[in-house]
Structure formats: C-alpha cells, structure tokens
Amino acid sequence: MGKIVLQAGADIDRSETPTERQQAVLDAALRLLVEEGDNLTMTAVARRASCSKETLYKWFGDRDGLLNATVQWQASKVRVTPVDRKGLDLASLTASLQRFASDWLKVISSDTSIALNRVAVGHAGSGKDDLGAIVLQNGRFALASRLKPVLEAGRQAGLLDFEDAETAFRTFFGLVGRDVQIRLLLGDRVELTEATIGGDARRATQQFLALFGANNRLKSL
Amino acid sequence: MGKIVLQAGADIDRSETPTERQQAVLDAALRLLVEEGDNLTMTAVARRASCSKETLYKWFGDRDGLLNATVQWQASKVRVTPVDRKGLDLASLTASLQRFASDWLKVISSDTSIALNRVAVGHAGSGKDDLGAIVLQNGRFALASRLKPVLEAGRQAGLLDFEDAETAFRTFFGLVGRDVQIRLLLGDRVELTEATIGGDARRATQQFLALFGANNRLKSL
DNA sequence: GCCGAACCGTAACGTACGGTACGCCCCTGG
DNA sequence: CCAGGGGCGTACCGTACGTTACGGTTCGGC
C-alpha cells in the first residue's frame, strides 16, 4: 500500500512496516541479493517475486528504494531478545559473553550478512543511500547496545574492571571478530564450523576476562 | 607494450611490470578509483590519463583487466622493508609491535586502502576476478608474514609465550583493528588522528603483551 | 624526406538495464 | 451481475557505458 520511503539524508528507521505481500517480495529480493550480489536486476526481482516491475516501482519508488527496504527488512527480522542480567556471578557472565561471541560469529559468517555487508560497502562510496549506516546500526552498534549493559552489570557486580564501556566493548569486538569479517567479505574461504565458532567464542571470552577481569592486575590500559 | 594479464583463476602476481607510461595511466586510474569508487568509467580513466580508450583496451584488455592491474599496481607500491630482529629485549619488541599496529591503522584508514577494499569487496560476490584475493594477499596476509617472524623471535627470546604464531597474530590483528576497518568501509566517519592512532597502537600492544607475555600466567587460552 | 608503429581524440555501435505504459485477469464491493 | 481497482506480464523507451573503428599526429629508423 504505502510507499516504503526513507527520508533522504535524515533519520533512519523512518518506515512503515510492509504488508504481507511486500514482505514476500522483499524476501525474494533478499534471496536474490544473496545469490547475485549488487548486480541483481529489477526484472530478476520481479520475476523471482512473481510480481510486475510496475508494482516494484510503485511500492519502492526506485532501485535504491528497493535495496533500502530490503536491507531494513532483513534488519527488522533480527530484533533480538534482551539479555537477562539476574545472574551476576562469574559463571553466568562468562556464559553470556561466550554466547554473544558465538552468536556474533554466526551472524557475520552467514550468507545473508555477507551479502548485505557487501552491497552496503559497495554503496558506501557514492553516498546515494545510507545502506552502510543501516547495516552498521543493526550490526556493530546493535551488538554494542546489547552487550554494554552486560558489561556494566559485570562491573557493578565487581567482576569486571574497566574505565569506559565503549572501549571495553571494542576490545571484545576485536577479540571475537579478529580478521574473520574482512576475510569473508573479500571472498576468502574461512572454515567456520560450529565447533570452531564455539572454540573461538571461548577463547575470546577468556582473553577478554584476562584483560578486564577484576581479579587481574592489568589495569595499565 | 605487453598486455598485463592475469591468468584467470590461477596464480597471482603473474604479471609483467608496467612501463613508465603505463604506470602513469595506472596511477590516474587509481586516483579516479579513490574519487569515484567502482563506478569509474573507461572514458573517465582515458580522459584523466590523457590517453585513448583504444590504448587502454590494448594494454589491459578489459575493464576488469584495468581494475586488476590497478589494484596490483598499488599493491606493488607498498612492498615493505623487512624488520630487523637484532634487538631482542622487551623494549624493542614492544616498539616493534607498536610500530606495526600504528602502521597498520594508518594503512587501513587511508583513502586508497578504503577505496581498494571497497571495490574488492564489491567484486568478491560475483567471482569474475580475484581482486579480493589480491587485496587480502597484500593486506592481511602480508602483515601476517611480516609480523610472524617478530613474534617467533620474541618467543625465542623468552619474551612471548604462545602455541601457534597464526592465532597469536590473529589476536593481535583483532586487538589493533577492532571495529575500525568495517566501520570505515561502511562509511562511518571514524576520528583517526595521529594521536588516537598512537594511543590505540600502544593500548593494543599492551593488551597483546598482557595476553601473550611470557611473564604472565595467562596460558589457559 | 619517407614509412610504419604507437598513440591520441572522438565518433559510432551494441547491449544491458532502469524506468514507464498498456492490456488483461482476478477479486471485491455494491 | 457489473464496475473498478490492484496487480501480473510484457512490450517499449532512453540512456549510460563497454567496446570497437577510424582519422590525425608524433617519433624513431632508413
């Protein structure tokens, strides 16, 4: 029904939720985006979604509009459950961190994440749309805003010791992701089985605790 | 004179070094790539380089060939000086690591690196060329092969303690880069002054030493 | 001074694709 | 039962750009 537009230049998430049918179309576009990358054609999307090009243009206005809506649609699908912070002992904190790490690794190694990041990076150069901002918002920054409360809680409970939650988070981010994302984006075949992800999550968590655990005396930033 | 071709699919760095004039053309293409991103046109390159399109096609065969040659040209320009490993005390090791970190941050935040990574990521989806492999080879893997000897030397000197140089390197990589590269690629304006780079390099180095320094008892990976 | 090769500038061709127009079907409401 | 609108399929238009062709110019060799 309503055009899903994005106020050019202004605020993000300025969008109405798409109808059932529109969601189907967006899903088709998403699947095609994963397969074809940025060189998907409007005709291909129309064919895949079994709809007419005219409909696409009526709904999304533009090729960029379609891409925008697709990315936002995927973003809206991964709204996550807020973490419970009732357990405040070291074991549960460790488990939480490990879970975050594991989830994050699974996300960034997924086909759709790779595809979305690829197109967003590609579009980031010529600032026609803000795909980059959207992806960033629903990736790195969403992770931060979910993880920071946990870190703060850990500090409150005397389990963690850090000055700034932001820098602590960024260190955790680096320890978890390392070179994985850029390698995947650049097409490197990285072996990421369930097992290695689990191991990496455990290792990253231990390293993070070694650096920011309250019982350790490594505070000299 | 000779076409600068790349054996499709096979080995990298299978290329003759370009002539003086060709280098000038490639530099022009590179500058244009930084400005325009992947939507540079052959006409634009020809105009910028003050050469004819016919020459471009004769030399590089193809648009992809031109891009390939441009990326390789930039890669060939950053052949680095191997590090001296004569000083084996903690101070010099720290200085080396810090220098690596600082250099790396400067590289990934440079305009040309961002532009090159952007096009390489964009092309990584549809496997027409191996720009991704080239960039990876001259970025992340080049860094690894330069840094690993230093790490090994540090271990020999009893300053570092790690099982596998590869994983140690990847941790260092993560501690240095954190979220910087992906944010830059996605168009986020990251403040990276000389000062912050220095601070980040120092911090990453200290964290790395905290994790892998031989005098610390954090070996339970 | 002449020849050919390399190269510049530009015009021309072909195509792929974004965007639009139109005819037809189906479905709903009156 | 009929009118109308939303939506499918498709043909079509315009354009941008990759690629090619061609005439003019410079330059080294004889």
Image (tube, coloured by chain):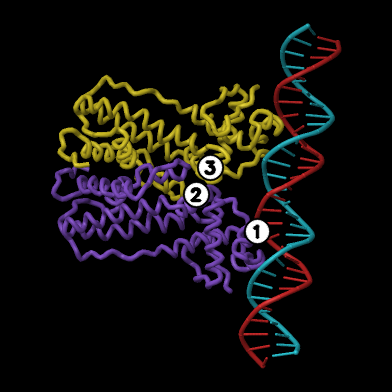
Chain colours: A yellow, B purple, C cyan, D red
Label 2 secondary element: helix
Residue at the spot 60% in from the left edge and 68% down from the top edge: B59
The residue that mark 2 highlights is: B118
Q: Chain of mark 3?
A: A
Split into 4 quadrants, where in the image is the N terminus of chain A? top right
Label 1 secondary element: helix
The residue that mark 1 highlights is: B43
Residue A107 lies, with reference to residue B139, above or below; the image says: above
In this rendering, do the residues under marks 2 and 1 share a single chain? yes
Residue A11 lies, with reference to residue B8, above or below; the image says: above
Residue at the spot 66% in from the left edge and 38% down from the top edge: A42
Alpha carbon distance from label 3 to label 1: 25 Å
Q: At which x and y percent is residue B114?
A: 46, 50
Q: At which x and y percent is residue B98?
A: 27, 53
The residue that mark 3 highlights is: A119
**Rendering quarter of residue A206:** top left
* A73 sits left or right of C20 in the view: left
Sequence-first disc among 2 and 1 = 1
* C23 sits left or right of A81 in the view: right
